[in-house]
Image: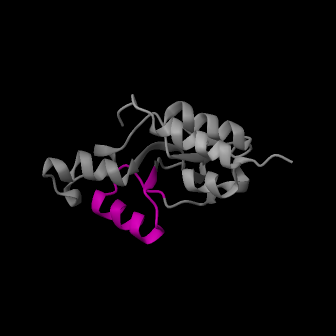
Amino acid sequence: MAKLARDVMTPDPACCSPNTTLDLVAKMMVQNNCGEIPIVDSSNRPVGVVTDRDIVCRIVAEGKNPSGHTAESCMTTGVVAVRADAPLDEVISTMEAHQIRRVPVVDDGGCCSGIISQADIAMVGAPEKTSELVSEISRSGRPSK
C-alpha cells in the first residue's frame, strides 16, 4: 500500500503565532531540531512559515535585532501545505513544484497536524524519488522566499 503524508510526517510540529518574537522562534528551532516553524492563527491553521534562513537573511543580515521583530515580519505567506491523506508521490510533486524543502501537513479542517521535510522523504522514499526531489528543489530559478 502506498504511503500517505500522515505516515511520514513529524506529528504535532512546534508552531507559533504571528506575534511570536523571532528570538523565541529561533529557540523553538533549536529545541525541536528543525529549520522551519509553521505560523498558525488562533484556529491552528497555517498562515505562514519561518525558516532559519528567513531569520538570518531578512533580519540578522539587515542588522535588525530578532527579539524586536515578530514572526509576521519575516514569514513567508501563501503557505503551501498537503493534506494528511495525500499520497507520498503527491507530497513529493508538491515540494518539487514549489521548490520547498519542508511542507506543513493539514487535517480535514485545515489545521496544522504535521510537517514533512526532505529528510523525511529520504528515509522512506525510493532513492530515485529522493534524488529527483533534491535535484528539483535545488535547481536554479528558485522563487524568492
| Position of 83 relative to 28 (above/below) | above
**Of 46 and 61, the residue lying toward us:** 61
Total number of numbered labels? 0
- Residue 133: x, y in percent? 58, 41
**Of 11 and 3, the residue lying toward us:** 3
**Of 9 and 12, the residue lying toward us:** 9
Taking the spot 75% from the left edge, 47% from the top edge, the residue there is 4
Taking the spot 26% from the left edge, 52% from the top edge, the residue there is 56
Task: Say if the magenta span includes residue 121.
Answer: no
Quarter where residue 52 is shown: bottom left
**Which residues are the magenta region?**
15-38
Task: Say if the magenta span includes residue 29.
Answer: yes
- Residue 121: x, y in percent? 63, 51
Taking the spot 37% from the left edge, 49% from the top edge, the residue there is 18
**Residue with the most extreme left position:** 63
Left or right, 87 with reference to 41 = right
Left or right, 49 with reference to 132 = left
**Residue with the most extreme right position:** 1
| Position of 124 relative to 111 (above/below) | below
Left or right, 130 with reference to 139 = right
**Coloured how?**
one colour
- Residue 86: x, y in percent? 72, 40
- Residue 109: x, y in percent? 66, 42
**Of 45 and 35, the residue lying toward us:** 35
